[in-house]
Amino acid sequence: MTIKPLFDKVVLKAVETEETTQSGIVLPGTAKEKPQMAEVVAVGPGGVVDGKDVVMQVKEGQKVIYSKYAGNDVKLDDTEYVIIRQSDILAVVE
Amino acid sequence: MTIKPLFDKVVLKAVETEETTQSGIVLPGTAKEKPQMAEVVAVGPGGVVDGKDVVMQVKEGQKVIYSKYAGNDVKLDDTEYVIIRQSDILAVVE
Amino acid sequence: MTIKPLFDKVVLKAVETEETTQSGIVLPGTAKEKPQMAEVVAVGPGGVVDGKDVVMQVKEGQKVIYSKYAGNDVKLDDTEYVIIRQSDILAVVE
Amino acid sequence: MTIKPLFDKVVLKAVETEETTQSGIVLPGTAKEKPQMAEVVAVGPGGVVDGKDVVMQVKEGQKVIYSKYAGNDVKLDDTEYVIIRQSDILAVVE
Amino acid sequence: MTIKPLFDKVVLKAVETEETTQSGIVLPGTAKEKPQMAEVVAVGPGGVVDGKDVVMQVKEGQKVIYSKYAGNDVKLDDTEYVIIRQSDILAVVE
Amino acid sequence: MTIKPLFDKVVLKAVETEETTQSGIVLPGTAKEKPQMAEVVAVGPGGVVDGKDVVMQVKEGQKVIYSKYAGNDVKLDDTEYVIIRQSDILAVVE
Amino acid sequence: MTIKPLFDKVVLKAVETEETTQSGIVLPGTAKEKPQMAEVVAVGPGGVVDGKDVVMQVKEGQKVIYSKYAGNDVKLDDTEYVIIRQSDILAVVE
């Protein structure tokens, strides 16, 4: 199965390496958005979204930090994904 | 009876196969949007919605993942449907 | 008495047939919008609403499914009506 | 004293006839907007309101159904009025 | 001291005459905006406010009814004022 | 240290004179915005803010009344400041 | 690892010097945005963000005061960062 995101949606797969665990993400408060690192696995076509033209900036294979609060968790073929709007991606990590 | 969605609305029918149950959707939190897989059964005409031009991207028969939180459940002739705005559809699954 | 809706408002009258009761509407949660089937009894003129041009798509006599949460219940001459914006009508049922 | 509404405001006076009481307004829930019938006693000039051009559609003497939730109750010279934006008037009753 | 309101702000001084007390304002609910009568003591210059051109309609000395909920109470030289946006003024009373 | 506000931000320093205390600010309710008098100590450059052109109207040294609810308290070199958007300044006091 | 912020995002690193502690930030209330001083470590490219053109005003190495409430905390290689929209930066401190 393949997930093809629509519009400005991006499909992410959590990066679960030991390194991530050690130097990973700090979640100091509970009422706050939980940013996370993940790998981009699919990118929507962009185009006109809610009346505004969106150009996709991220690419498959990039590691990104995102605001998890806004994403949707999906499990498909035993793999967990997050589908998120590109505008909820905060940064690319290289 | 036939449901003809207006504007940018899409009518979905839940995909309830065993495969879906096994490799299905993870709903880790309760206060969070619950994404789900469903089949598109009818697509609205699109056009100007809330002052913005909307082109319909999904088609009948496609399987999609959507953010259930925003949809409306309807039961008609003993079949359950979800009517949802296209912008609440996250991805097409192939 | 006659109700003449303004702007993009539509006046609906609940369809309360037995068939509707049997294969009626599923309301699984309480915190969620309750969609319902109803018959259109009057349609506003449309035009510029909140700065946007609205063309009315529904017609008197059509059966529609709507998101009841957004409507206003009115009782006039012992008949109950719902007055709703056209954009809160989800689909036409034929 | 005379109330001259500004912008897109409309001054309403409750219609409290027996007929209204008998075939009056149904208020099934408490958390919901309470629509009511009232008579238009004064209409603002319209014009540009919040950057959008508003043309007044209602006239003095008309009976209207409105969404009371959005209005402001005012008592002046022992008469109770409701001042409401025209867009919160749902329909004219004739 | 003189208060010179900025933008679309208007400075009001409560009208506390006996007449006002007798035929005054009804505040039926507590969770609702409390409209009040007051005298205009200063009017801002208007102009572009939040990207929209605002023309001031009220004048010093006019008595107005306003939605108190949106205003700010200020006490200066032992006099209490309310500073409010013009759009929160509902009507002029003559 | 010098605070240079960005965009439409203004830096204020509370006016804490005896006069202010005596004829000071009334804060009748707790759930309401608390307006306060303060002196302007720095003014941002204005320009395009959130897609709208903002011209700065206030100047250093002016005393202003502002809606404290929207501001941010900052302590720098033992002096307390409030950083606020110009649109949250209600009036200039002379 | 390097964080490359997208769009109008800015990466900040908390300034934790003794001076900061002594003449640091006042957080008088708990329900209020907590402004903080931090150093800019990376600046996004700006461009069209949510349909509006954003020009980046801050630079690497500047100390800024920001409204922490809107930011996202991230820990990467044992260093804590805050990723924030430029519009949530209140002022530059020199």
Image (cartoon, coloured by chain):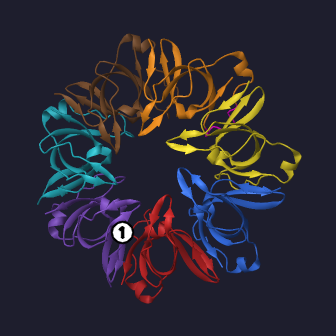
Chain colours: A cyan, B purple, C red, D blue, E yellow, F orange, G brown
Above or below — where is G28 with respect to C59?
A: above
Please tell me in which quadrant of the rendered image residue F3 appears: top left
Q: Identify the residue under disc 1.
A: B7
Above or below — where is D10 with respect to E25?
A: below
- Label 1 sits on a secondary structure element that is loop
For the residue carrying disc 1, how many other residues have a C-alpha within 10 Å: few (<14), some (14-19), or many (20+)? many
Position of D72 with respect to G64 (left or right) is: right
Q: Amino acid at mark 1?
A: Phe
Asked if residue B8 is among those painted magenta in the image, a careful observer would answer no
Position of E57 with respect to B74 (left or right) is: right
Q: Nearer the viewer, residue C4 or C47?
A: C47
Q: Residue at x 19, y 26 (%)?
A: G77
Q: Nearer the viewer, residue C79 or G52?
A: G52
Above or below — where is B78 with respect to F71?
A: below
Magenta residues?
F26-32
* Whole-percent x, y for residue C91 in the image: 37, 74
* Whole-percent x, y for residue E54 in the image: 58, 44
- Any part of residue D30 in sight: no
